[in-house]
């Protein structure tokens, strides 16, 4: 019998009445050395449970392999949650959305153009079953049936917004049960439309997702499920940001009032997010409704606990609300973590990307450009090179467009940029000589995580022509950049101008790696600020902080204290365009953009 059971109007945990007071905390968006701190702060806010998705794409990076280390050490996270006295809700998907790259579906799965994702197509369900065969055995000791913290497991994720294949949902239910999951199973769906009808299963608890109009949405849930606990499995108290869009937020008092309405109705809740964390590296997803819109690096979400783990206005407001309905620890609310003193970092060495390709792996040769999927390339960049047979003005056409952003160079000189979000496919150019070298650097800005466009390819998506004539003979060079290149191969950068009245030092507009060092005595959280830089990636001590872009709204990258070390630290930037400075800054305050008034 599962530890968590249901009654006509609530939950029982080991036979005693229980209300789930949960907050979302994705272990894979938080540095592992900070898990204990974030879990303790969840308990101190009054939560008795934490919820996390499980990203299939990172846990099974290639078919038949299982990664459970570092940011992906889920067993350790579960042990720490239990040590803090917290229960856990697990959401293994297989689809998670979560504004995560590909919604958590592995890119190697979506390279089959005929596969029907999130359906009972055997090509999909067989892959899911093989994944569960890998994932579940090491997690079973952490189920409540074995004395662990996991009290419930979700089946799929907001499936009613995607499809209505009940046989698929039943297959997932059976797959979990047959592999030893005895705990309560639940589904979650948006409460509007027919989502609760299409995404639920008989005998599986239905929960709803919403952020406002509490009474209305609880009534819709009760209408769809006449008996059983009322639960909001995602109570949206903030939102995420896209590059070039606004920085989202929600008034703390407004969110707290809706939380109070939820709890006053006797409902259980999972606050989405309690602590958002960061889309480190190349892990952010994207939306594509009317146009492609990639998600920023920060997943702060305007959550009660900020991206850097500090209690914000919602933390205190929610703690007060929870105290009206359940016991809250008597410990004082946590204080913000210490921050490094502001400092400037000089980037003194440089390595141009196009002349550094030999250090980053071999190229694949093909008559026409190969997509990222054909190259087996999950994330990062792809460099393409060919030659142009004739000089003169002309029109480059990229058949099918680019996925997602392409920088074009002729004989090393920038010729233009094409972006998926603008549906760019053509670029006028002037070729100075026969045999000119055409370089195209394509950036994967994040795989779509919601809707029918999951699995859309990346890279160059078709042949390239010049005035209708196909360009042949391509060298396709995947650049995963899972690690920053070795700074010892960089050459010194010209020193800055000696007088304060001189214009800022300007570097060339070619893509290049830049390296500098800085010294600290005691590691603490900080934020990397890059005024004067345009777009690229940042690493500190080899840890991939993520993407920066002066398009905003995000202006700083969070640097977790455990990434730093006493003494000398390394900063590496890949700047894709130009920079008017050779300096970067460490600041003690985040810059995520102004919230709408």
Image (cartoon, helix red, strand yellow):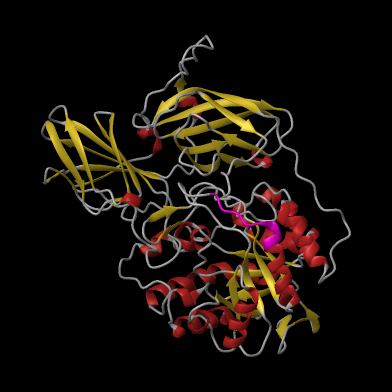
- Residue 251: say if magenta: yes
In the displayed structure, does residue 32 sit left or right of residue 381?
right
Name above or below for residue 15 compared with residue 460.
below
User: Which residue is the extreme one toward the top?
Assistant: 499
Q: Nearer the viewer, residue 361 or 484?
A: 484
In the image, which residues are magenta?
A: 247-254
Residue occupying image coordinates x 78% and y 66%: 322
Of residues 196 and 102, which is closer to you in this image? 196
Q: Position of residue 213 (x, y in %)?
A: 61, 72
**31 is higher (above) or lower (below) than 188:** above
Towards the viewer: 463 or 64: 463
Asked if residue 532 is among those painted magenta in the image, a careful observer would answer no
Residue 180 seen anywhere in this rendered image of the structure: no
Quadrant of residue 451 within the rendered picture: bottom left
Q: How many marks?
A: 0
**Quarter assignment of residue 191:** bottom right
Measuring from the top left, give residue 566's x and y in whole percent.
70, 31
Let me know if residue 513 appears in the view. yes
Q: Main secondary structure of the magenta part?
A: loop
Question: Which residue appears farthest toward the front when viewing the image?
Answer: 597
Q: Residue at x 38, y 68 (%)?
A: 452
Tell me where residue 347 appears, x and y as whole percent: 52, 24
Residue 66's x, y, as percent?
Answer: 53, 61
Q: Is residue 545 left or right of residue 512?
A: right
Q: Is residue 505 above or below residue 198?
A: above
């Amino acid at each position: 019998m599962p530890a968590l059971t249901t009654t006509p109007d609530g939950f029982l945990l080991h036979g005693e009445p229980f209300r789930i007071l949960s907050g979302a905390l994705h272990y894979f968006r938080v540095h592992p050395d900070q898990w204990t701190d974030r879990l303790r702060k969840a308990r101190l806010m009054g939560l008795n449970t934490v919820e996390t998705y499980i990203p299939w794409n990172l846990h099974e990076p290639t078919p038949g392999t299982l990664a459970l280390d570092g940011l992906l050490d889920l067993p350790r996270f579960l042990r720490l949650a239990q040590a803090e006295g917290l229960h856990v809700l697990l959401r293994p998907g297989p689809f998670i959305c979560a504004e995560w790259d590909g919604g958590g579906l592995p890119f190697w799965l979506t390279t089959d153009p005929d596969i029907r994702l999130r359906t009972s197509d055997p090509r999909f369900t067989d892959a899911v079953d093989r994944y569960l065969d890998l994932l579940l055995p090491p997690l079973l000791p952490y189920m409540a049936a074995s004395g662990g913290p996991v009290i419930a497991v979700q089946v799929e994720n907001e499936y009613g917004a995607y499809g209505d294949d009940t046989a698929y949902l039943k297959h997932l239910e059976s797959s979990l049960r047959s592999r030893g999951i005895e705990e309560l199973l639940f589904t979650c769906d948006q409460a509007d439309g027919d989502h609760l009808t299409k995404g639920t299963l008989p005998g599986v608890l239905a929960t709803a997702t919403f952020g406002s109009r509490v009474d209305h949405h609880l009534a819709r849930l009760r209408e769809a499920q006449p008996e059983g606990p009322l639960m909001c499995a995602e109570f949206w108290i903030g939102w995420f940001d896209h590059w070039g869009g606004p920085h989202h937020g929600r008034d703390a008092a407004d969110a707290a009032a809706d939380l109070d309405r939820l709890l006053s109705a006797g409902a259980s809740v999972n606050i989405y997010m309690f602590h958002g964390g960061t889309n480190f590296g190349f892990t952010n997803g994207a939306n594509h409704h009317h146009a492609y819109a990639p998600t920023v690096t920060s997943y702060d979400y305007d959550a009660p606990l900020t991206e850097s783990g500090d209690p914000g206005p919602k933390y205190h407001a929610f703690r007060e609300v929870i105290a009206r309905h359940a016991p809250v620890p008597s410990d004082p609310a946590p204080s913000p973590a210490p921050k490094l003193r502001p400092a400037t970092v000089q980037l003194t060495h440089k390595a141009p990307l196009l002349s550094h390709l030999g250090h980053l792996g071999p190229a694949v040769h093909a008559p026409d450009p190969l997509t990222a999927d054909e190259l087996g390339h999950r994330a990062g960049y792809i460099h393409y090179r060919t030659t142009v047979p004739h000089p003169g003005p002309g029109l480059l056409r990229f058949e099918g467009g680019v996925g997602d952003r392409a920088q074009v160079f002729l004989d090393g000189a920038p010729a233009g940029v094409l972006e998926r979000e603008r549906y760019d496919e053509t670029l006028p150019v002037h070729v100075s000589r026969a045999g000119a070298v055409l370089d195209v650097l394509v950036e994967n800005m994040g795989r779509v995580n919601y809707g029918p466009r999951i699995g859309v390819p990346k890279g160059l998506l078709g042949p390239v022509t010049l005035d209708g004539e196909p360009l042949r003979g391509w060298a396709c060079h995947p650049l995963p950049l899972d690690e920053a290149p070795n700074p010892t191969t960089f050459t010194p950068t010209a020193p800055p101008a000696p007088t304060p009245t001189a214009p800022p030092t300007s570097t060339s507009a070619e893509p290049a790696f830049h390296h500098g060092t800085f010294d600290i005595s005691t590691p603490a959280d900080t934020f990397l600020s890059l005024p004067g830089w345009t777009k690229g990636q940042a690493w500190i001590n080899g840890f991939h902080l993520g993407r920066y872009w002066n398009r905003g709204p995000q202006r700083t990258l969070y640097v977790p204290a455990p990434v730093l070390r006493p003494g000398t630290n390394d900063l590496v930037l890949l700047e894709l365009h130009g920079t008017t400075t050779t300096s970067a800054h460490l600041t003690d305050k985040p810059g995520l953009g102004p919230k709408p008034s």
